[in-house]
Image (cartoon, rainbow, N blue to C red):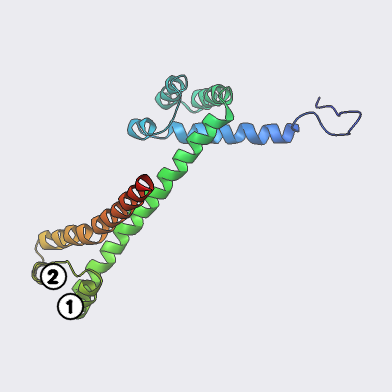
Amino acid sequence: MRGKDPDTGEYFGPSRSQQRREALEVLELGERLASLSDAQLARLPIPDTLLPHIVETRRITSHIARKRQLAYLAKQMRREDEETLHAIRDALDAQGETARREVAAIHRVEQWRERLLDGGDEALAQLLDQHPRADRQHLRQLVRNALQERRLNKPPHAYRELFRELRALLVVGTESATDADTDTDTDDDSGG
């Protein structure tokens, strides 16, 4: 039983419903961890005491046995401090946001490729206005070759090469600009 303080009337601890919600949150976190690859797990701040339990949970395929192992994993996770679990959740959320940004960048590159193939010189002019350092001749040649491949039903070599060029221009260019901004910020902080 939870109990009440006779003087103030406040409850001593969290309600059973609150405890159940917290336990279910930890169980869901355990399921997410068990579904990650080794490389993804290595990037997370997971204590060494939990790693064997996560690996064991991933190994089990039988439904009931896996469910039981997940419950055991959650029990082990509840023994960790709340800060540890919070750090793991934050790292997982950051990875999810990074993946969403990467997918959005790929979609942006694909949209530009289609615009270049459908819009011709007008779309190329718009791209070059936004990215003046781009190689106009090379992009024009790739667009021309990709259109010829389509017309002749050839394998899409230039089509793929156009994607790679656009990705280098749009995505890598954006990342290096962001890195330069970050480097500038840290230089300012250390110099002041």
The residue nearer to you, when weighing 27 against 134, is 134
Mark 2 lies on residue: 143
Residue, disc 1: 120
What amino acid is found at the position of numbered circle 2 in the picture? Answer: Val
Name above or below for residue 29 compared with residue 136. Answer: above
Element under disc 1: loop
Return the x and y of residue 70 as percentages of the image width and height: 52, 26
| Residue positioned 47% across, 36% down in the render | 32
Name the amino acid type tagged 1: Gly
Q: Position of residue 176 (x, y in %)?
A: 26, 54
Callout 2 touching callout 1 (CB < 8 Å):
yes
The mark that comes first in sequence, 2 or 1, is 1
Reply above or below: 63 against 164. above
Label ID, residue 111: none
Q: Residues within 10 Å of mark 1 (few under 14, many from 20)?
A: some
Residue drawn at point x = 44 percent, y = 25 percent: 54
